[in-house]
Image: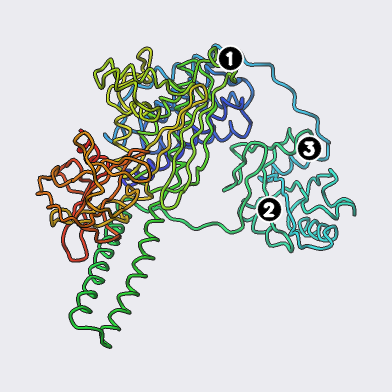
Amino acid sequence: MLDLSEFRDIFLEELSEQLQTIEEELLALEREGGTDAGIQRLFRAAHTLKGSSAAMGYAKLKDLTHEMEHVLEKLRNRELQISQQLASLFFEALDGLRQLQSEIVHHHTEQSDMADTIQGLRGYTASTSPPPLQAPPLLPYEIYQKFLAAQDKKRQLVWLTLQLSEHCEMRYARFQIIERKLDELLELIWREEDGTGPTDEASEASRSARWLVSTSLTAEELNELASALMDVEQVDLELAQMERLQTQPEVIVAEEETILPELVVQAGRGVRQDTAKAASIRVNVDRLEQLMNLVGELVIDQTRIQQAGKILRQRFGPDEAFDEFSQLSDHLTRTVGELQESVMKVRMLPIEQLFNRFPRLVRDLSIALGKEVELILEGKDTELDRNLIEEIGDPLIHLVRNAVDHGLESPEDRRAAGKPVKGSLRITAAHEDDQVSLLIEDDGAGIDTDKLRQAAVNRGVMSAAEAAQLSEHDAVQLIFHPGLSTAAKLSDVSGRGVGMDIVRNDIERMNGLIDIDTERGRGTQFKIRLPLTLAITTGLVITIAGRTFILPMSNVAEIVRVEEAAVRTVNGIPVLTLRNQVIPVVHIHRYFGYPEPADSGRYRPLVIIGRAEKRVALAVDELIGNHEIVVRSLGPYIGKVEGISGATILGDGKVALILETGGIIKMITR
């Protein structure tokens, strides 16, 4: 008997991809009212899942996708029309598929009962009367006969659009030669005559022409044949459907039984078949992690070799053997650096994988809250380490939920304020230097700082006098205080007074920063900055009481050296005035239980760290310099230590702890 367990991982990969396709197409179907090509892609995704589920023995997946396929068939034949009720039924079915997927992943078997979901789909088709069918448009008899003949020969009818190189001269003559060549190799049925094809010498300025051909070639073979023709720069392929030839040759939908292999047809147009395809393979994530660990070991060894070279030069001075050693060390450094960069790129993924979660989330929230929301996603191609994409997902989801629930007003309130009824939520990703910037912006009512002040007073966070003295920026930061909320009532979406503090903690745990910019009546913007990766990063090596520590450079605002006399005490707190800003000075020794250094009267290095506009100056004993560090977890035996995010191995082989900026600020402001 065939053991199907070896195909399980392949099936689950395909399942994830098809479910993502179904979600994207369902959102487009509801938003745009449905196109033939979109419904076709939905139908094929459901059909593919039905077949693979049946082959793997997952009956519930098969039954649910079969019922979805049945309803989609009616949509495809125009016996049904898309509605919000039907879209909601489809999304309910999609959630059921994802639930079954989770059960298969964790329990290797289906557990949930999908009978109610299946019955909901069946009940909708039974209760909805189909609209009257429209007769297909009449076709010229000659074309109709050729179409039937092509079907009898098991051939495909394909729209073939060719674009010539801009450097091609005598395009009219070139099109004539291409047409004769196509007539020899294929069966030409129709030539589009709209003034842009090779029909007269006036088309000399045109670079493209379009033919309808009958062929038994696959899409790849046809693309290769057409691309080989002289002066052809681009090839576009679209499948033809008989009843559309005369009236709408530009909108062509392929039936499932006649679809060309490897040919994808999108709404109203064909997807370009690139003549050169990028080669790619799938690699198990565990192998990538192992490769990253090995590169990390090389980075550590390379640092130790450089350290050893410095010691040897100091001890024995320069000589010929040492010069050769230095050259080898420099070459190793460059090679390891290039290898590290290549492995880092392999770990990078487009943030689109994260963004794909939001359209469905915003759609469900807008329906639940009775709001109209336009979601705008920008920078989908921005790449981020796959681990960070997983980590940042939950904080972003919370911010999106808050923006739709708290930020955007109801349609009535927006209308009264003179705003468009439909609110706008924009999520943008972009690279800035060696970091990734994420913006979550809404055009809602903004954050009411007066309500935040009052909430802080009511919960005993501060007195009324202290709240009144807060600047607008400091008042907005109260939203990150545990338990504070300006919501008038609690809801299932948000407003329970918890969460924003967790959002900031999660972001700071990733060595990131979050800041808020808000204006009443205009909206709110959350800005998040994240490092590209957490595996290998640049750190500032410092010493405190003879111990070596690392501060991530992404959290270091600046480094200054000041005379100890420049540090003054205000209300019992040592402070430094720097460019008209008063910054608290903290001797971190006392928080780690180390003896504080004696006042030497000399210059003392201060490392200024902070989030947003809030800054803290850490007094350290010595600055060693910047180094590439490999971040290692402390492991389950030690567990979570406040103020420490991990450890690394230095060039001398010693272990140094990596400071967590968010934890440090918590310790010193407690």
Q: Locate residue 233, reporting x and y percent.
A: 70, 58
Q: CA distance from mark 2 to mark 3?
A: 26 Å
Question: Quick one: 308 or 318, which is closer to the camera?
Answer: 318
Q: CA distance from mark 1 to mark 3?
A: 55 Å
Looking at the image, is 160 positioned above or below residue 650?
above
Quickly name the residue at label 1.
415
Quickly name the residue at label 2.
235
At mark 1, the secondary structure is helix
In the picture, which quadrant includes the C terminus?
A: top left
Q: Quadrant of residue 25?
A: top right
Q: Sort mark 3 into few (<14), some (14-19) or many (20+) by Cα contacts within 10 Å.
A: some
Q: Earlier along the polypeptide chain: callout 2 or callout 1?
A: 2
Q: CA distance from mark 2 to mark 1?
A: 49 Å
Q: Earlier along the polypeptide chain: callout 1 or callout 3?
A: 3
Looking at the image, is 64 positioned above or below residue 316?
above
Residue pictured at 74% horizontal, 40% vertical: 147
Question: Quick one: 382 or 595, which is closer to the camera?
Answer: 595
Quickly name the residue at label 3.
144
At mark 3, the secondary structure is helix
Question: Quick one: 165 or 651, which is closer to the camera?
Answer: 651
**Amino acid tagged 3:** Tyr
Decide if residue 1 is in sight here. Answer: no
Q: Locate residue 665, reporting x and y percent.
A: 25, 39
In this view, the residue farthest toward the bottom is 320
Q: Earlier along the polypeptide chain: callout 2 or callout 3?
A: 3
**Amino acid tagged 1:** Arg
